């Protein structure tokens, strides 16, 4: 009976109290009770995004939130600059394609970060660019882009900055207003400690001005419809109200722990994991690693699938495979949400034991020892 | 401490076992376990829709499912005929507008049904009409349209029929393949006895042929993307997997009871409710009433809000107000899903007692007595 320990970079583990919240009797959403939940959750989302902007709660995945944002911020006559170096950046490029949004692509190598200097070149060359689309933490490559540096370029131009914060907000330092980011999105199943099913979009006044200047060709994930309903603490279409009830609780847990403490914990876990990997002779894929999820290259001679299967089968430790072109080449371990030092130490130990069992040479205890040293160092 | 009795036409009450299913530890969706859930649920959805077609499970509300369907079935050069006589039909018209889908409107009176003869006139006059969009049970007016009769017109023409079955499938007789309906949609929070958060689209081969003939301008609710992933029992974007887990259970409960038995129970509750209303001197709004939800006109001299508030406050019985132009003019009581004779009898009693308390003249017990007589008759 292996106990499941979910280390995939979404869905992540959900606190037991939050799970139980979803088992409570169903309520209607056009009630004062629901309006109170949504109001409390919305205020806590502003804290989460560090923004006084409008925080919209959509029923859908992070992709729903991204679709809603992308189609709304590029008016006719303007262009998007899509910065991508991983599967999710590519997906937002595909959204532009599908909606025939005029766009240019800044493609960078998998595992590296978008370079603000290159972004500046694009902006200088083409004043039609009205929105830069970036991924803060690219979950597929586990790499972090300095979106604050990119915001310094966009905020002084007639150009919005949208950031995919799906695996950053609520676990990595992110300061929407201070940095000058105009529109940011995330999903429920990452740092927010919830099951999948909710997407979030935070929008500042500068972004609303653009959004209000034209009619985006979208109905379900329409940001204006959500803003209108939010004025009455409602949603334009029936919301996933059991998830919103759970959201209210999970956000209150985040607020209780405090964002700074959560950021520090996430960074601590990531740093110690990288240390442990090094001590086991393993290498990190990303040149600019994100602290929310660590991508470790599968060492030569080890079968990625077999390795992950044994970790899960023997020890209940579930890591994610690489995605797209990285499939079979790496394992990804999440540091987001409801996960702590002891959980992660266990995952490192499982990683080490299964590697050894498959013929990889590593001194017993090297990983956990390095992990513990990094924690105390 | 009033116990809550939720009679709104969505969300509806959810069985306790289904609620508990959502409190189980979170699992990843790219696992054999999840694939088995989705496979079982998808087979049961085919039973629910009475169709051998493809049944897609989207993360979103019924509106997400409708958007996905509507934008996919009207290729460039063709037109939609939108039949509407209520808020939801109007919403599907608005989807056409937003996506600039060429369309004509067949508007009929609130409370009445779409007339197949009128639909035939539209089709004869304009061969560019490639899709008829109808609402089977219009939740806002509680009226039922004979979609089988409309299907007899479309199935012999080069024209698809889409039906909104949000408050029909799983509670009212609906036979997609036998009737010749090409694409049908529903949501989780009605007859499926689940919280909101999932939308469903059933698609037959005739519809796929049209869908495959062009690229619909949609990303998130894209039916082709869902079909592609379903081949591996997966979803293109992270699904609301706790809801899918619960879906598997709720559909197995439906299968156990049997659709014919559920249809009979729903009809019995609706008939007895109409009888009770009549016995209390109340009138039914719809000329062609649907059996899934009954809309009762608020009698003269009674304040709708006050009436509903007292029912909920004193007896925990929550009915819905009218929608749109019917706001304040009717109460709506659902007969869908996890609701039975005793539940509904209680709601009728609450209705009667609160009416009397607000000065309405009715003999004590008239409603429940008529309700019971109708059940035994």
Image (cartoon, coloured by chain):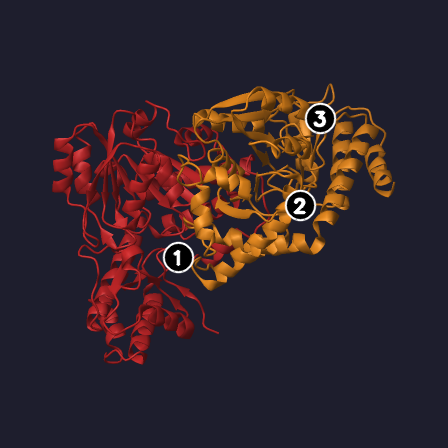
Chain colours: A orange, B red
Percent across and percent down for residue A138 are 63, 31
Q: Looking at the image, is B343 positioned above or below residue B57?
A: below
Residue B239 visible in the displayed image: no
At a point 32% along the width and 33% down the height, the residue shown is: B100
- The reply, left or right, for residue A195 in relation to residue A29 is right
- The reply, left or right, for residue B131 in relation to residue A80 is left
Judging depth in this view, the residue of A210 and A299 nearest the camera is: A210
Residue depth check, mark 1 versus mark 2: number of the one nearer the observer: 2
Q: Cα distance, mark 2 to mark 3?
A: 21 Å
Residue denoted by label 2: A337
Residue denoted by label 3: A286
Residue denoted by label 1: B12
Secondary structure under badge 2? Answer: loop
Judging depth in this view, the residue of A274 and A354 nearest the camera is: A274
Q: Which quadrant of the structure image shows residue A196?
A: top right
Percent across and percent down for residue B154 are 19, 33
CB within 8 Å, label 1 to label 3? no
CB within 8 Å, label 2 to label 3? no
Q: Which quadrant of the structure image shows residue A269?
A: top right
- The reply, left or right, for residue A19 in relation to residue B246 is right
Mark sitting earlier along the chain (2/3): 3
* Image mark 2: chain: A
Secondary structure under badge 1? Answer: loop
């Amino acid at each position: 009976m292996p106990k499941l320990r979910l280390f995939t970079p979404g869905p992540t583990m959900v606190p037991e109290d939050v799970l139980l919240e979803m088992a409570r009797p169903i309520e209607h959403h056009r009630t004062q009770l629901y309006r109170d939940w949504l109001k409390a959750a919305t205020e806590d989302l502003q804290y989460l995004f560090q923004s006084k902007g409008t925080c919209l709660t959509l029923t859908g995945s992070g992709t729903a939130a991204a679709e809603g944002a992308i189609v709304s911020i590029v008016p006719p006559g303007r262009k998007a600059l899509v910065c991508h170096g991983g599967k999710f950046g590519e997906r937002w490029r595909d959204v532009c394609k599908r909606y025939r949004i005029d766009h240019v692509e800044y493609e960078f190598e998998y595992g590296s970060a978008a370079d603000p200097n290159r972004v500046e070149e694009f902006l200088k060359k083409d004043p039609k660019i009205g929105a830069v689309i970036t991924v803060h933490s690219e979950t597929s490559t586990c790499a972090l882009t300095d979106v604050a540096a990119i915001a310094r370029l966009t905020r002084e131009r007639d150009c919005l900055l949208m950031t995919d914060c799906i695996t950053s907000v609520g676990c990595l330092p992110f300061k929407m207003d201070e940095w000058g980011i105009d529109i940011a999105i995330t999903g429920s199943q990452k740092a927010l400690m919830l099951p999948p099913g909710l997407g979030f979009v935070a929008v500042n006044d500068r972004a609303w001005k653009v959004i209000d200047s034209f009619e985006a060709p979208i109905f379900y994930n329409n940001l204006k419809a959500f803003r209108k309903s939010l004025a009455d603490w409602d949603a334009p279409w029936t919301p996933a109200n059991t998830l919103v009830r759970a959201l209210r609780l999970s956000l209150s847990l985040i607020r209780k722990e405090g964002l700074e403490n959560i950021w520090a914990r996430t960074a601590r876990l990531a740093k110690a994991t990288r240390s442990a990997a090094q001590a086991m002779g393993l290498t990190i894929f990303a040149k600019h690693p994100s602290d929310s999820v660590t991508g470790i290259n599968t060492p030569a001679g080890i079968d990625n699938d077999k390795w992950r299967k044994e970790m899960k089968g023997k020890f209940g430790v579930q890591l994610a495979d690489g995605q797209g072109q990285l499939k079979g080449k790496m394992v990804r371990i999440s540091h987001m949400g409801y996960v702590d030092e002891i959980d992660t130490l266990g995952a490192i130990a499982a990683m080490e034991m299964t590697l050894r069992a498959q013929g990889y040479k590593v001194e017993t205890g090297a990983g956990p020892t390095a992990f513990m040293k990094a924690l105390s160092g």
